[in-house]
């Protein structure tokens, strides 16, 4: 899977060492959430990069970043009012067949001012992933259990390591 730096748009995407599933989406599609408004989001980077989000259905988004299109699925990570969400990203078209694609995972913190992305890093977060991941290959931790993935994402969220911040334009 090609990796992009985005608001994975916000996910694992252009990074070394992420969390992935190889055999389909591990987030529960019956618990989709749509906390992000459609539109353009500006990344807090030197270039002020812009990504575009389009809502496709409860929890499903299309992300366009630098001409590349990806499918996203967003699900609550904690209580509904926590503002924390698990997000999965895959190649364009995977929303139609989520059980046939590889997905990358990250955490979003959403409030009225900004969206913060927390990206798991298999090397830095091995203390969390070691007992939850089904296997590790180079810098990627692979998961096959939805519960193990959600537990690992919640533990990483508690670490609070923000990778990117976005503001809606």
Image: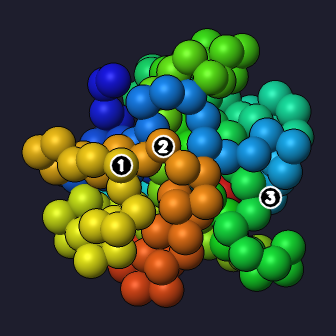
Residue sitting at x 36%, y 55%: 133
Alpha carbon separation for disc pair 1 and 2: 6 Å
Alpha carbon separation for disc pair 1 and 3: 30 Å
| Front-most of residues 70 and 125 | 125
Q: Is residue 62 left or right of residue 59?
A: left
| Front-most of residues 98 and 16 | 98
Q: Is residue 44 left or right of residue 60?
A: left
Dot 3: few (<14), some (14–19), or many (≥20) neighbours within 10 Å? some
Secondary structure type for disc 2: loop
N-terminal of the pair, mark 1 or mark 2, is 1
Say which residue label 2 marks: 144
Say which residue label 3 marks: 35
Tell me residue 137's x, y (percent): 17, 42
Secondary structure type for disc 3: loop
Q: Are marks 1 and 2 in contact (CB under 8 Å)?
A: yes
Asked if residue 76 is positioned above or below residue 103 in the image, the reply reads: below
Say which residue label 1 marks: 134
Residue sitting at x 45%, y 38%: 21
N-terminal of the pair, mark 3 or mark 2, is 3
Residue sitting at x 67%, y 15%: 97
Tell me residue 67's x, y (percent): 45, 21
Is any part of residue 13 visible from this angle? yes
Is any part of residue 6 visible from this angle? no
Secondary structure type for disc 1: loop
């Amino acid at each position: 899977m090609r990796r992009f730096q985005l608001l994975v748009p916000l996910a694992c995407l252009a990074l070394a060492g992420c969390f992935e599933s190889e055999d389909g989406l591990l987030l529960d599609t019956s618990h989709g959430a749509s906390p992000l408004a459609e539109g353009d989001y500006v990344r807090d980077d030197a270039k002020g990069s812009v990504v575009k989000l389009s809502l496709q259905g409860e929890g499903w988004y299309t992300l366009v970043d630098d001409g590349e299109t990806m499918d996203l699925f967003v699900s609550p990570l904690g209580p509904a009012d926590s503002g924390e969400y698990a997000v999965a990203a895959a190649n364009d078209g995977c929303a139609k067949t989520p059980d046939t694609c590889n997905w990358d995972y990250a955490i979003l913190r959403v409030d009225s001012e900004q969206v913060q992305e927390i990206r798991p890093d298999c090397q830095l977060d091995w203390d969390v992933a070691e007992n939850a991941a089904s296997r590790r290959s180079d810098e990627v931790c692979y998961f096959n259990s939805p519960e193990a993935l959600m537990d690992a994402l919640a533990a990483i969220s508690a670490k609070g390591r923000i990778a990117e911040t976005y503001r809606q334009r």
